[in-house]
Amino acid sequence: MNYAEQAQRLRLYRIIGGSSAALVLALNMLSIYFERGPKTAEKIVFAALAVALASAIYYLPFYLNLTTEEEKRLRWAVKFRWAACGIIAVVGAPFIVGATHRHQLALALLGTVATVAAVNLLVRTQLKKRQKAFRFAPQTYLLTDTALALIWTWWKIESSAFLSLALQWASLFYIVTAEPARAAWARARQRIIVFAVAAAATLALTITAAPDRSLFAACAAVTTCLCAGELLAAFTFDWHVKTRARVVAEIVAFTGEAHERVRRRLLEASSALAANWRRDQPSSPEEIAAWYRRNSCLYIYDLANFHLYGKHIRFTLELLKLARGRVLDYGAGIGDLALELARRGHAVVYFDLEGDARSFAMWRAKGEGLINIDFPAEQRRIGGTFETIYALDVLEHLPDPEETLRFLVSKLAPRGRLILTAPFGATEAHPMHLAPTFDVRRFLDEHGLREAKGWRKWFGPAMIRRRHVLIYQRAN
């Protein structure tokens, strides 16, 4: 994967996504501000929904489209719907207290929650029955949301700002959960142009039509949300398709397999590795090492697939910023990180077990003509010290992680950085993750290293904020 290109794509997405979300938020705030009917408490709730909507516009296309999991969108939709039931109940409950027709309002709120839950249960059941994405789930959600929004607006709320926000949530939900092909540039371009023209027209009316500014601002917000959703969905889908095509082509060139088989194995590798581990049950260090060598080919597909996820792309781009000087990538897998560091001019040492994944990394380095990366076959041949050491997704696979960590610390230069992950403990997807009684943080503290994650604990990419991702620095 070319991370320079990924960084460019991410910068462009931030510009487009941030601008779109800010514009939609501003229009919604104008609609709420100019509207005379709702009370202050209702306006505060509307404003909170507008902020949440702007965040969703920016985040969801990136999260749901940069992935190879075709059913991820609908699985996420089902989970979000359960949360939405609770949100509707919590937000609506305070308005029942003191209302003239409390019992009638309570029944209406209960009916709304029950309707959302019933539709969600139907979609969930269909997904389980068919073992694939329920084709009409996005349309079902859209019709339900629109109907509920219209009923509440007509019956009780009587607010154009509320109706606008509800329709924006419904339309965004539909755009990000619909079939990915719908978001392709060729099919989305016409819709984007139509929504952009409509947004511009209604925005002009918002500015000029003083008596009806709230209504026109609400209409402008809807059309702008539609335009932003379509634009960002198409952008991220195109981004993912092009990146995946290059990854597949590279694996095809190395393995000689057909494109369709490579694409299928990208999706199947993770479950195949988990099944192989449960079947073989390696226990001794020798058996574990032999198991990884036998399954090294599957790791080409598993790691390549994992690296296509939007969250992992952001994570890797942040890790690349931490590199300085001579670098050791320990347990480097297919070499994505090590090769990118070499492209950026670092002297790099790649280390991993003998196997297909290591051969793939060496083949890629040779094909690119990278001469500043070494591939020692044995740990004892790793010479010198390093200003930066990466050990990502390594320690949890080792029967004795303390011995390996001791070696890595011994190779760290004064003021050098050690970046590692330690997600100990088996999971359903990763039964090969071991759970040794070993405190990594305490070990590093005792050996003179200090935590250096800093602001990234709170404001870094999602993956780097996780507790099992450690960034430590040697004091001297």
Image: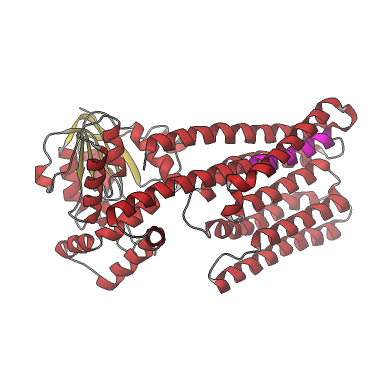
Name the quadrant of the C terminus.
top left
Q: Is residue 428 above or below residue 51?
A: below
Magenta stretch contains residue 96 = no
- Name which quarter of the figure residue 348 lies in: top left
Where residue 165 appears, as percent x and y from the top left, is 74, 44
Is the magenta region chiefly helix, strand or loop? helix
Q: Is residue 133 above or below residue 95?
A: below
Quarter of the figure with the N terminus: top left
Is residue 48 visible to us here?
no
- The reply, left or right, for residue 80 in relation to residue 412 is right
Q: Quadrant of residue 450?
A: top left
Residue at 56% of width from left, 72% of height from top? 130
Write the residue at 25% across / 50% down. 360
Q: How many marks?
A: 0
Q: Quick one: which residue is furthest to the left in this view? A: 380
Horizontal and vertical percent for residue 243?
Answer: 43, 45
Q: Magenta segment range?
A: 214-228
Residue 396 point in image, percent of width and height:
28, 54
Q: Does residue 132 appear left or right of residue 442 in this picture?
A: right
**Position above or below: 114 against 37:** below
Residue drawn where x is 76% and y is 60% of the image: 112
Determine if residue 314 is in view: yes
Foreground residue among 448 and 277: 277
- Indicate the position of residue 144 as horizontal and vertical percent values: 74, 59
Position of residue 216 in the picture relative to residue 66 (left or right): right
Asked if residue 305 lies left or right of residue 378, the reply is right
What colour scheme governs how the chains and residues are painted in the rendered image of this protein? secondary structure
Q: Nearer the viewer, residue 247 or 271?
A: 247
